[in-house]
Amino acid sequence: MPQSYLKNLQMQQQTVNPLFNFLGVTIDIISREKVVLRLPFQNNFIQGAGVIAGGMMATLADEAMAHVVLANLNAGESTATIEMNIRYLKATARGEIIAEGVLIKKGKRVVTVKADILDDKRQLLAQAGASFMVIEKKI
């Protein structure tokens, strides 16, 4: 399942991840080591203080980390986020946001990952970390 999902996700008119379509997320890289996702700027991402909402960065970070986990799962396995943290370092008001998710450690039941969130000038906006549970489907 994870590998066929990842293959379908990378197709031009993908239908397996409606959130990516809704937000306009594009994929640069999906591998077992790293996932790079891009979120094009939309005026709807701006919050009351005039900068891109932190929740948009958190969403993109979560998706990048989840997809690097998916790239490391075996057939019959799925995943769910156990916990996630994010540290905001710099605000941005315009431009594309990039999330680079990286595998830290894959255990039998828990996968640890991290993500850097960058602006379109490659300046670090935030850093996130998460743990994901590996779920075996019962047949």
Image (spheres, grey):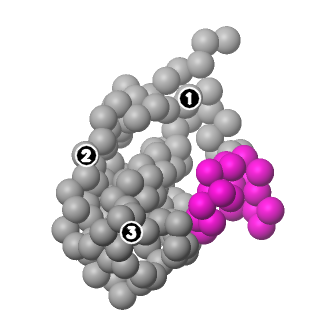
Q: Nearer the viewer, mark 2 or mark 1?
A: 2
Q: Quadrant of the N terminus?
A: top right
N-terminal label among 2 and 3: 3
Which residues lie in the magenta part? 7-26
x, y (%) of residue 119?
Answer: 37, 78
The residue lying at 25 percent from left, 46 percent from top is 85
Q: Which residue is mark 1?
A: 77
Contact flag, marks 2 and 1 (Cβ < 8 Å)? no
Q: 117 or 40, which lies in front? A: 40
Sort mark 2 into few (<14), some (14-19) or many (20+) by Cα contacts within 10 Å.
few
Q: Is residue 107 above or below residue 70?
A: above
Q: Residue furthest right?
A: 13
x, y (%) of residue 56?
Answer: 43, 59
x, y (%) of residue 9?
Answer: 69, 55
**CA separation, marks 1 and 3?**
35 Å
Q: Secondary structure at mark 2?
A: strand
**CA separation, marks 2 and 3?**
18 Å
Q: Secondary structure at mark 1?
A: strand
Q: Which residue is mark 3?
A: 52
Q: Which residue is mark 2?
A: 85
With 106 as the anchor, is 76 left or right in this view? right
Q: 32 or 118, which lies in front? A: 118
Locate residue 100: give its quadrant: bottom left
Note whether residue 84 is visible.
Answer: yes
Q: Is residue 14 magenta?
A: yes
